Every structure is written in C-alpha cells, then in structure tokens.
Image (cartoon, rainbow, N blue to C red):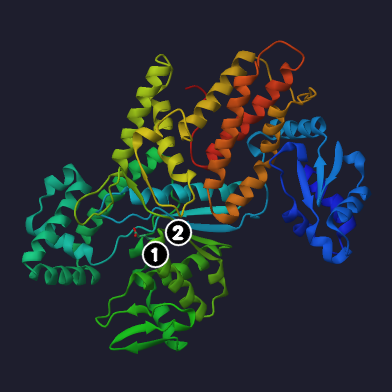
Amino acid sequence: MSVKDLIIESLYAQLSEHLSKEEIDKLIEKPSNSEYGDYAFPVFTLAKIYRMAPNLIAEKVAAEIDSNLFEKINVVGAYINFFIKREEHAQNVIAEIIEKGQDYGRTDIGKNGNVPIDMSSPNIAKPMSMGHLRSTVLGESIALILEKINYKPIRINHLGDWGTQFGKLIVAYKGWGDEETVKSDPVNELVKLYVDFHEKAEENPELDDQARQAFKKLEDGDPEYTELWNWFKEESINEFKRVYQLLNINFDYYTGESFYNDKMGEILDLLEEKKISKIEQGATIVDLSKYDLPVALIKKSDGATLYLTRDLATAYYRKRTFDFVKSLYVVGNEQSDHFKQLKAVLKELGNEWSDDMHHIPFGLITLNGKKLSTRKGKIVLLEKVLLEAIEIADKQITAKNPDIENKDEIAKQVGVGAVVFHDLKSDRQNTFDFNLNDIVQFEGETGPYIQYTYARLNTILRKYGKEVATDHPYRLNDEHSWEIVKLLQQYPEVIIRAAEQFEPSVIAKYAISLAQLSNKYYAKVRILDENEELESRIQLVKAITIVLKDALSLLGIAAPEKM
Ligand code: ARG
C-alpha cells in the first residue's frame, strides 16, 4: 500500500460516515515545508459535523490513529501532520521500481479498450509545417501515456486529401506545371504551383471557375485527374513519412478525408429520416441553437459536402470499426467550434457515444516569431527545423564528448528530442514562440538536460560495475534522497493525471523536477564513495534512471545511455 493510501485508510476508519475515500484523498495536502510532515490533513470540513473548534477536532481524530504505522503524528492548529517511516517506505518504493523496471507505473485502467487518435493529419500537396508538429507529437505522447495504463491507442492520420484545392492544383499543373520539375522536389514544387495559382487567379478570376470544374471532374472519377491526384498524394505521403521517421512515429491508418467519399450518403439520409436536418435556400443544415452553436452546414446548395459532413461519416465509421471507449481528435483550438458542432449533430442523432469523443485542442506555435501560412508561401518546414536541431545537437555533443560512439544516432535523438520536449513541456493550450538555439541546450528546462542527466547517472552505474541488488536494505535517510524517493513514488499517479487530462506536459514537468532534484543530489553527495551506504545510493540512482527513461519514453523521446 502506498503511504498516501495508508493515511487515507487510517482517516477513513474514523470518518467513513462523513467522508468518502475520494474526498479524503482530495483534502490531503503535501506541506511545502517538511517540518510539517510529509502529508497533512486539514479538518475544517469536519467543523460542522463535530461542532467543535478545528484544533480540538484535529486532536481527537489524531488520537485515534494507530501511531505505530507512522514515524510521528502531530497536530498544528487544524492540521494533522503525518511523518512517514522513511526508511521502511523508501525501501519499498526503491525495491518496487528496480523489480518492475519499465513496468513501474503500469496499471490496467484502460482494460485494453480501443482509443482511435486522430493526429497529425496534414494536408496533401502542402508541406508539413510546424503547425502540424504539435498535433503529431501531442498525439503520439497521448497514445504512449494511454498505452501505459492499458488502453489500446489506434493512430490515425486523417490526411486532408480531398477538396477544391485539388481542382486548383490540377489546373495549375496542367496549365504551367512540368512533370520532371515536380518529380525533383515534389511537395515544394506543388506548393509553388498552388501559390502561383492564387496569384494568377487574382488577375484572372476565370481560373477559379476552371478549378471548380476540375474538382467536379475529379469527384466524378475522371481517370486522368484521378491519376494526377493519386500521384500528388503518393509523393506527399512519402515526404510526410520522412518526418515521421525522424520522430519515430508510426500510424496504424492513413485513412484521409477521401476515404469517406462514399460514406456520407448514409448520414445525410439518417439526418433527413430523423427530421434533424432541413433545407434552407437549397442547402442542408442542422439548427444547433439549443446547443448555443452556429448552424451546421451539411450540404451546400450545389450538392458539395463539407468538412463537417466528412467528420460525421468518420465518427460513425470509427465507432463501428473500433467500438471505441474514447475517440480523440488532436487538432488546433481554432477548430473548437467544428468539433462542438460535430458532437452536437451526433447527439441529435441519438448517439450517446458522442460523449466519448474528445477534441484535444492546442495553441499555435511560431518559430522565431514567424507565423505559418501556405498561401503566401511563408512556410517553416518541419523537416528543416528537425534537421537543424540535429545539427546543433551534433555540435554540442562534439564539444563535450568528441570520441563518442554512434554520434550521429545520438545527435538525432538529442536534436529531435529537444524539439519534441519543448513542444510538450508547456500546457498544450499555451501559444508560444521558440528559438532553436535556446531549446537544444544541455542546461535549463530542456529535453537535452534530462537526457544528459540520464546519461550521467548511467555512467555512474557503469563505473559501479556490479549488478544492482534489490534485496540489499536501503538505508538512506537524508533530506535530499528522501525528496527524490517521494517524487519517484508519485510517478504512477502522475501518469494517471496526464492521461485524464490528455496533457503530456504533466509528464514533462515531472521529468524536469526529477532531473533537477537528482542533479542537486549528485552535486552534494559522492555517490561512488566506498562506505556502507554505497549500495543504497546505487539503488537510488538505478531507480531514478528507470523512471527518467520511462518518462522520456512516454513523451516519445529516446534516452541515450551515453552523451
Ligand atoms: N487536415 C486538417 C488540418 O490540417 C486536420 C484534420 C483533423 N481531423 C479531423 N478529423 N477533422 O487542418
């Protein structure tokens, strides 16, 4: 039983008539000053029931707790302060971590339930920009966190591979494009064509009509246009995959928007049958005023379906195919209304499972103050950013450790890890700007800092040279190591919190705290000193490396053994 559970049980034994275990759990505090114990329980909420002064209630409750379970219990004002039997407790925590290894913190909360995660989802014939980085790395980390508590994540790339822009691209390519040029640098050349199209269409609006007709032909299955579209798509996916490979991310499905072309009719029929939709000025709409949402446009008067129509079909498809327990959409917060409308229409159709769908919004990031826009051709390419980060990492590693083996691989892990970590460490709703040189640093709250801490602790273990024993009694009792043990013990709860909030930053912040505390300890104590506490210190170091590595892995970041 964890220490906190022990405290909860002890209090619950007396207070079960008034408070549930969950309520007690929520009331328990961690005093910032350890003079007031490791945990404290304020009794204010009991004042009404006991009709006594809070300090007297605290005294009364404290007197009934089995004091053998704790080092000490005292009362200060309205607080009951619990002092844990450190050595005994620390021994349990450390032994558990070393025995379980990377399984420490694993639970069965998810019961293997399917969770499709709609993530990354860039648009075909456009480069993957920094804007898509967030969706990709947030989605991946959420998948890894959910996996740890035994959900079954299903990574889906809902590519933007359908829409009027393909009409424009076809007109541009057939008008002034060239096969060889496109083949030499596909996505960039396609973007150029797209940008050119918009410039030319400003002077020559006829082009827009041609684009509409071209898209219509594509929708009707014109073989030449379909082949072109397939080609654009293939080239784009190949380029996206290069980035996913750098990030070490694999998708289970590349089912983009076009996959739902033949799956929308059924939804339109259902909406009509159930009298949920109506026709207004030729267009099919759903009134959502009772949800305080704008009208949902389902079909335009010219018969064209919309992004929302496709997402309705997608939701049904995912429910039927995966029978999901949750269905996640990691998409920027500018699409919040879209997902609210989506859920509301599904609710109107009587689908209770729409409550299991969650839009996981996030704020926009910019690089060196530059915003991202494909129209004007001002794009910050994700691949370029990652390669630059790897280069900066390589320089730092060369300066620190020029003869290191596998330098290229390590530079990749550090450079990419730096970008990913920076992206995940702040609350996902934050918007922020970043500068590559600042984040690929071995100091500060960075990914490389945590990787470096991990590598340094591993060097100690290598120097120690022996197998780390679990059965050897753990004896440390100083303040510093105790703070670390308390943090290590919190790890399983931290994972659950991150999963409940779909918030990888909870893990990232935890990893920063653990690395900082460990470095403080390392600076204060000579870990490899031959004395009777050597084994205990080594056990502590081993436990830290296990948890640091696992925390990084939940963020999708590698932990090199040497750096
Ligand atoms: N392709 C879209 C974009 O880049 C994101 C798609 C998100 N997923 C969805 N099911 N709507 O803006």
Q: Which of the pair 2/350 is nearer the observer?
A: 2
Quarter of the image with the N terminus is top right
Residue farthest to the top?
Answer: 530
Q: Mark 1: which amino acid?
A: Gln
Q: Which residue is mark 1?
A: 335
Can you say whether 339 is above or below 535 in the image? below
Q: Is residue 560 visible?
A: no
* Quadrant containing ligand 1: bottom left
- Residue 188 x %, y %: 20, 47
Which residue is depicted at the point 24% across and 81% down? 302
Q: Is residue 522 left or right of residue 2?
A: left
Q: Badge 1 local density, few (<14 within 10 Å), some, or many (20+)?
A: few
Given residues 399 and 265, the one toward you in this image is 399
Disc 1 versus disc 2: distance between alpha carbons?
8 Å
The vertical placement of 462 against 375, above or below, is above
Q: Contact, CB < 8 Å: mark 1 with mark 2?
A: yes
Measured from the top left, where is residue 357 in percent x and y? 52, 65
Q: Residue 364, position in %: x, y? A: 37, 53
Q: Which mark is residue 361?
A: 2
Mark 1 sits near ligand 1, with its Cβ under 8 Å away? yes
**SS for tag 2?**
loop
* Relative to 235, 339 lies left or right: right
Q: Earlier in the sequence, mark 1 or mark 2?
A: 1
Neighbours of disc 2 within 10 Å: few (<14), some (14-19), many (20+): many
Q: Amino acid at mark 2?
A: Pro
Callout 1 secondary element = helix
Q: Please name whichever residue, 541 or 223, is drawn nearer the observer in this view of the structure.
A: 541
The image shows residue 224, relative to residue 29, as above or below, that is: below
Q: Is residue 306 visible?
A: yes
Q: Residue at left 58%, top 52%?
A: 499
Give residue 335's position: percent from left, percent from top: 39, 64
Nearer to us in this view, 208 or 535: 535
